[in-house]
Amino acid sequence: MHDVYMYVAVMAVVTYLIRVLPLTLIRKEISNVTLRSFLHYVPYVTLSVMTFPAILDATGSQWSGGAALAAAVFLAWRGFSLFSVSVASCAVVFLLDLVMA
């Protein structure tokens, strides 16, 4: 049981340092264009990396997940709303799982 408290303590310290060190070490505005661009896209990349595997694994098969992803990307690229893209993706998964089962 002693090890569990040590693991939680180490995790807390590391999490705290990751959040506090940039605030204390970087006092002025970042002027490097490349670094600013990189930092701008980090939240989107992180969200994509967390979401993409779930899209393929959350359905009955990876084929229906991939087809729904392709349909969603196509419709989003064409400017459809988030609601219509979501409904279309769900419909694609439903129909493909119905046909494949």
Image (cartoon, rainbow, N blue to C red):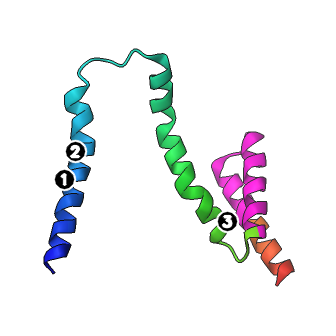
* Residue under the point 20% across and 66% down: 8
From the viewer's perspective, tell me whether residue 100 is left or right of residue 62. right
Is label 1 or label 3 in front? 1
Q: How many other residues sit within 10 Å of disc 3, few (<14), some (14-19) or many (≥20)?
A: some
User: Residue 6 magenta-drawn?
Assistant: no
Q: Are marks 2 and 3 in contact (CB under 8 Å)?
A: no
Residue shown at 78% from the left, 68% from the top:
63
Circle 2 residues within 10 Å: few <14, some 14–19, many ≥20: few
Residue 45, given in percent of the width and then of the height, sits at 54, 43
Disc 2 target residue: 17
Q: Earlier in the sequence, mark 2 or mark 3?
A: 2
Amino acid at circle 1: Val
Quarter assignment of residue 5: bottom left
Give the mark nearer the N terminus: 1 vs 3: 1
* Residue occupying image coordinates x 13% and y 77%: 2
What residue did someone put label 3 on? Answer: 56
The dominant secondary structure in magenta is: helix
Please say if 28 is above or below 101.
above
Magenta segment: 63-90
